[in-house]
Image: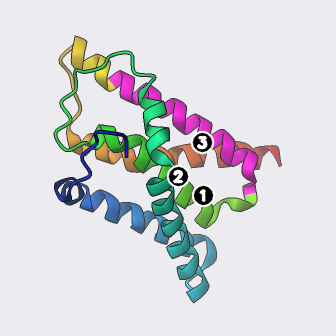
């Protein structure tokens, strides 16, 4: 996580159901795409392990890069750290969903999706900060957590749809 980010047990308690739903999404997608077999379970566990490894090794720098594009430094009260964790969580979920079900679409499609995800994260973080600072409007934490789950799935749906139309 980014420097200064509190990945305390309290953060993990608040984000527990978000993590649980994400794991369910990955497992459900794996079983939907590949059938209910032991190999599919191994594939899902491997994708989740890869996502966790990605968060532990790479995503701190990625999150700092995304946050460096902020135009408003403050404004949104983020008591549970949901907005600060958004880039890391969404990137890991995107990777796990891709690995478990969409690798045959190729790495160029993956790269397009990852770039679109990064652009979306920059827009969402700036939009939330801007609206909170200038209009006094801020999403609830549950809305940020819901977007953390839905965003990567929508990006994958979009890039896979475009890639399948080009085939």
Q: CA distance from mark 3 to mark 1?
A: 10 Å
- The answer to whether marks 3 and 2 mark residues whose Cβ atoms lie closer than 8 Å is yes
- Residue 28 percent across, percent down from the top left: 48, 70
Which residue is label 3 attached to? 114
- Residue that extends furthest to the top in the rendered view of this protein: 134
- Tell me the tag on residue 98: 1
- The answer to whether marks 3 and 1 mark residues whose Cβ atoms lie closer than 8 Å is no
Start-end of magenta stretch: 105-127
- Residue that extends furthest to the right in the rendered view of this protein: 167
- Residue 58 percent across, percent down from the top left: 51, 49
In this rendering, the answer to whether 133 lies above or below 66 is above
The residue shown at (46%, 28%) is 122
Mark closer to the chain start, 3 or 1: 1
The residue shown at (34%, 39%) is 3
In this rendering, the answer to whether 37 lies above or below 60 is below
How many residues crowd mark 1 within 10 Å: few (<14), some (14–19), many (20+)?
many
How many residues crowd mark 3 within 10 Å: few (<14), some (14–19), many (20+)?
some
In the foreground, 73 or 125: 73
In the foreground, 61 or 45: 61
- Tell me the tag on residue 94: 2
Q: CA distance from mark 3 to mark 2?
A: 8 Å
Quick check: can you spot residue 150?
Answer: no
């Amino acid at each position: 996580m980014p420097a200064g980010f509190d990945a305390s047990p309290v953060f993990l308690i608040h984000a527990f159901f978000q993590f649980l739903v994400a794991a369910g999404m990955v497992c459900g997608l794996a079983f939907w795409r590949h059938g209910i077999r032991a190999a599919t379970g191994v594939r899902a566990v491997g994708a989740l392990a890869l996502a966790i490894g990605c968060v532990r090794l790479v995503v701190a720098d990625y999150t700092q890069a995304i946050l460096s594009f902020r135009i408003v430094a403050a404004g949104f009260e983020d008591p549970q750290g949901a907005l600060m964790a958004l880039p890391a969580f969404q990137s890991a979920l995107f990777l796990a969903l891709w690995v478990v079900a969409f690798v045959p679409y190729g790495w160029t499609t993956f790269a397009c999706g990852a770039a679109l995800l990064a652009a979306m994260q920059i827009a969402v973080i700036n939009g939330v900060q801007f609206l909170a600072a200038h209009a006094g409007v801020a999403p609830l934490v549950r809305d940020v957590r819901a977007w953390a789950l839905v965003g990567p799935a929508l990006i994958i749906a979009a890039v896979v749809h475009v890639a399948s139309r080009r085939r």
